[in-house]
Image (cartoon, rainbow, N blue to C red):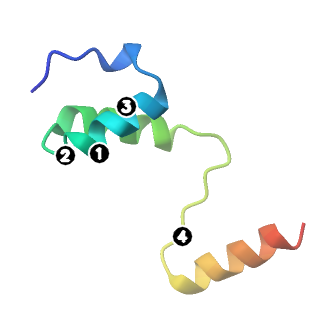
């Protein structure tokens, strides 16, 4: 959709671009790929899981 080279942007720049261009699906998917590749990423599905994860991290 865009001629923008997503590889040249920092994560913060790409996040800002996606926020201002929500119709650019390609940019959004590229940003998701970066976020999902982060080490130690935690995924929760419920409020209870979120609360348990927050309690665990705050106890450290």
Which element is circle 3 on?
A: helix
Q: Which mark is residue 6?
A: none
Question: Whole-Å distance between the Cαs marked 1 and 3?
Answer: 9 Å
How many marks do you count on the picture? 4
Q: Position of residue 33 (x, y in %)?
A: 40, 36
Q: Residue 7 vs residue 22: left or right?
A: right
Instruction: Tell me the residue at 15%/15% (across/down).
Output: 3
Instruction: Tell me the residue at 79%/67% (across/down).
Output: 57
Residue 8, image quadrant: top left
Q: Quadrant of the N terminus?
A: top left
- Dot placed on the residue nearer the N-terminal end, 2 or 4: 2
Q: Residues within 10 Å of mark 2 (few under 14, many from 20)?
A: few
Q: Which mark is residue 19?
A: 1
- Dot placed on the residue nearer the N-terminal end, 3 or 2: 3
Residue 51, placed above or below residue 42: below
Q: Residues within 10 Å of mark 4 (few under 14, many from 20)?
A: few
Foreground mark, 1 or 4? 1
Q: Look at the numbered discs 2 and 4 and tell me whether their residues touch, using CB distance below 8 Å.
A: no
Q: Which residue is mark 2?
A: 22
Q: Which residue is mark 3?
A: 14
Q: Look at the numbered discs 1 and 2 and tell me whether their residues touch, using CB distance below 8 Å.
A: yes
Question: Whole-Å distance between the Cαs marked 1 and 4?
Answer: 23 Å
Q: Look at the numbered discs 3 and 4 and tell me whether their residues touch, using CB distance below 8 Å.
A: no
Which element is circle 4 on?
A: loop
Question: Whole-Å distance between the Cαs marked 2 and 4?
Answer: 24 Å
Question: Whole-Å distance between the Cαs marked 3 and 2?
Answer: 12 Å
Instruction: Tell me the residue at 58%/39% (across/down).
Output: 38
């Amino acid at each position: 959709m865009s001629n923008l080279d997503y590889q040249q942007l920092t994560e913060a720049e790409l996040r800002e671009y996606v926020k201002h261009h929500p119709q650019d699906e390609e940019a959004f998917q590229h940003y998701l790929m970066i976020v999902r590749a982060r080490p130690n990423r935690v995924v929760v599905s419920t409020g209870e899981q979120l609360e348990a994860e927050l309690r665990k991290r705050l106890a450290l």
